[in-house]
Image (cartoon, rainbow, N blue to C red):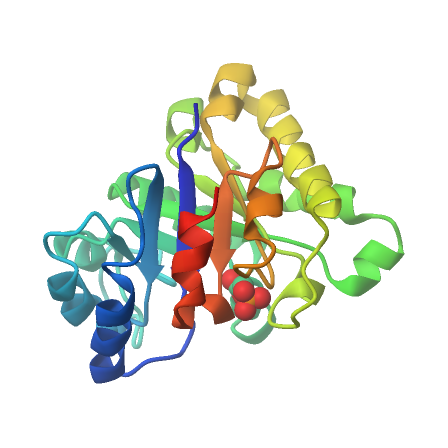
Amino acid sequence: MRKRLVAGNWKMNKTPKEALELVALLKDKVNTADTDVVFCVPFVDLIPVSEALEGTNIAFGAQNLYFEDKGAFTGEVSAPMLSEIGCKYVVIGHSERRAYFGETDESVNKKLIQAVKYGIVPIVCVGEELKTREENVTIEHVRSQVKRALVGVSAEDAAKTVFAYEPIWAIGTGLSATSEQAQEVCGAIRTVLTEIYGKATADSIRILYGGSVSGKNSEELFAMPDIDGGLVGGSSLKEDFATIVNCK
Ligand code: PGA
């Protein structure tokens, strides 16, 4: 049985002071009994948020890392740095990073491998633009992103990853994919994982849906057989996040 995971992707929101206010708002409202909950926060918020989450079952995560251990990579943050402060998750290959910061399937692959090496669970984002959906090649596109992310990754390491299907047209638009659309692609991701690693490994990997998840649609989305939770942007910055986490 896969345990549900709900990850808040705060993106570039919340100063450290504001982050503490948001943690204070949410931490006693989210029920972590049946759901793994993680706040993926800006780098400067990681340490204050980690301190504020002490004594709770809520994990914290980053939104990026660099694939080298250390060195002359000005502006980057390494996996050893994140691991030392107890960071449990990292978002990799978010469509905003692919679109604005030159993230490619190749760098996503290297970052996935680096995260797993340091015991950090990568939440690997894939998803299509509206144009791709309109051309009816969504499944091919997403299959290719998943395969490229996993080049050279063993079944044992693949089992330590999480995938997030995020259709780009649904991100921040208020226009979520329908639960059927989301299930179709999440199911296709499970199929590629099965082809590469076999059923047992594929069945153990959590696949999230992201893109305008809210307290209104989470229950229906999460009820789908291949959707194991959500990657939540806008709604992770308010009380609605607790409704999403606590939904049936
Ligand atoms: P959204 O963002 O929930 O605001 O659509 C999701 C994401 O980008 O991870």
Q: Quadrant of residue 82?
A: bottom left
Taking the image in four quarters, ligand 1 sits in the one at bottom right
> At x 74% / y 42%, what residue is drawn?
180
Residue 108: image x %, image y %?
49, 52
Q: Quadrant of residue 193?
A: top right
> At x 32% / y 80%, what residue is drawn?
14
View extreme (right): residue: 135
101 and 206: which one is in front? 206
> At x 33% / y 43%, what residue is drawn?
36
Q: Is residue 64 visible?
A: yes
Q: Quadrant of residue 70?
A: bottom left
128 and 33: which one is in front? 33
Q: On the rendered image, what quadrant is the N terminus found in?
A: top left
- On the rendered structure, is 63 left or right of 225? left
> At x 62% / y 66%, what residue is drawn?
171
Q: Is residue 72 visible?
A: no
Residue 230: image x %, image y %?
50, 50
Marker count (numbered): 0
Residue 221: image x %, image y %?
61, 46
50 and 112: which one is in front? 50
Q: Is residue 107 above or below residue 34?
A: below
Residue 6: image x %, image y %?
42, 50
